Image (spheres, helix red, strand yellow):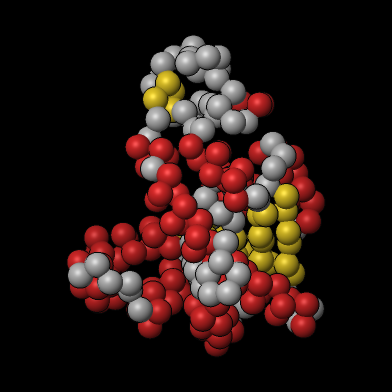
Amino acid sequence: MNILFFGPNGSGKGTQGAILKDKYNTPHIESGAIFRDNISKGTELGAKAKEYINRGDLVPDEITIPMILDRLKQNDAKKGWLLDGFPRNKNQAIKLDEALRAADMPLDIVVEIKLDREIAKNRIMGRRLCVNDNNHPNNIFIDAIKPNGDKCRVCGGELKTRSDDQDESAINKRHDIYYNTVDGTLAAAYYFKEAAAADGAMKYIELNGEPSVKEVADELVSKL
């Protein structure tokens, strides 16, 4: 299964990707990690990307997409993959779709986790990290995992916050890009939604991101 994942920051997209990775032994490939890997290894594409990044410019699709395709062709992805973090606009979606088809790696499934923007922002700003174990789930805006006052709900440890989780302007900026249905990330998702409606070979799955992690995961697995 070749799967493309969409969802705003705060929707639990990364968590669901990790669940699918473990369940189906499918690599969860995040676009940012591809950049870091190519740059650290000093690949030709990585060197070109670094030039743009160092100037503060966006890396062109002509560099990004070949980098992504190269990662998707690696041995661990031969039986399928889960791509997350790209495309971020409709033009990138068109180019990625064309490149995947040309490489005979067409998408099988596109997943969109839907979540109200305000809820997504609250989930990010409500995250609390346990000093004993960051994997202990604590969030002041999610009833099921609310901490015990200012202590970890799992072990009673002290809690802290990540500075970027509390940067409301940065969160809004990321969400401005994602929720833009004209030329943002949702426009990319809707491109694939229309393609799936016109082409029965591709499946488009919409999930409500509000329920618990387990409920969303159960619904996702049932629809795959």
Q: Residue at x 53, y 61 (%)?
A: 178
27 to 90, vertically: above or below: above
Give the quarter of the figure containing the N terminus.
bottom right
Q: Is residue 78 visible to us here? A: no
Pick the quarter of the image with the C terminus: bottom right
Q: Is residue 146 left or right of residue 220?
A: left
Q: Is residue 50 above or below residue 201?
A: above
Residue 65 drawn above or below residue 125: below
Observer-nearest of 200 and 118 = 118
- How many discs appear? 0
| Residue appearing at x 49%, y 63% in the figure | 177
Q: Which residue is rendered at x = 53% and y = 75% of the image?
A: 183
Asked if 218 appears above or below 202 in the picture, the reply is above
Query: x, y percentage for residue 8?
Result: 56, 54
Q: Let me know if residue 138 appears in the view.
A: yes
Q: Which quadrant of the view contains residue 61?
A: bottom left
Residue 187, picture quadrant = bottom right
Q: In this view, does 199 lie to the left or right of 144?
A: right
Residue 179, horizontal then vertical, whole percent: 57, 61
User: Where does the image place residue 10, in percent across and percent down from the top left?
Assistant: 55, 45
Coordinates of residue 113 in the picture (x, y in percent): 66, 54
Q: Which of 76 and 160 is in front in this view?
A: 160
Give the residue displayed 41% in from the left and 16% down from the top: 158
